[in-house]
Amino acid sequence: MIDEARYLSVVQATPKPQVTFKYVADGQEIAFEKASEGQRAAVLLTMLLKQEGGPLIIDQPESDLDNSVISKVVALLHTMKSRRQLFFATHNANLVVNGSAELVAYMANNSAGRRIIEHCGAIDHPPLRDAITSTMEGGKIAFKDRQRKYGF
């Protein structure tokens, strides 16, 4: 027999939803807490990018991601940037260039050591393009060396 107090505690109980993430690699599920930092970052970044809503601000998403994951993120950027405003602080040229950034603010330190916007505009703006090439690609020579080594 159930007494009134026990009955009321069950009826008035508030469910506590629990979200469980799993990472799937090569068809094998990995518990989120056992996934690597990069795998967890990839899951969370993908989840954030796929959500619709207000502006999304992400600071250095590339920190724990390898270039193959960044390529997938870039593909997702093309889809999602028409649905919500995206702001990235990044040092990764793939996110800026291949992600077709519409507006890039290139930051630098001034003589007082304060951060300033040195160049701002689209990536085809010559001073901005040169700054991106120099900083993110290691300069034109390094970029051309990689092209040659990869056989492009």
Image (spheres, grey):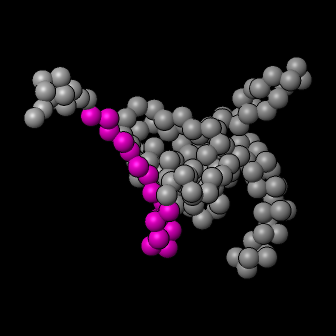
16 part of magenta stretch:
yes
Residue 29 appears in the picture as rendered: yes
Q: Is residue 53 above or below residue 149?
A: above
49 part of magenta stretch:
no
Whole-percent x, y for residue 113 in the image: 86, 23
From the image, which quarter does the C terminus lie in? bottom right
Nearer to me, 15 or 83: 15
Farthest residue in the front direction? 1
Residue drawn at 79 percent across, 48 percent down: 135
Farthest residue in the top direction? 112
Magenta residue span: 15-30
Left or right position of 106 against 30: right
Whole-percent x, y for residue 143 in the image: 78, 63
Residue 96 appears in the picture as rendered: no
Residue drawn at 12 percent across, 32 percent down: 2
Nearer to me, 79 or 134: 79
Nearer to me, 46 or 4: 4
Left or right position of 92 against 20: right
Q: How many marks?
A: 0
Tell me which corner region of the image, top left, top right, bottom left or bottom right, holds residue 82: top left
Farthest residue in the left direction? 1
Nearer to me, 102 or 32: 32
Residue drawn at 40 percent across, 31 percent down: 54
Left or right position of 12 against 133: left
Whole-percent x, y for residue 109 in the image: 82, 29
Whole-percent x, y for residue 139 in the image: 82, 55
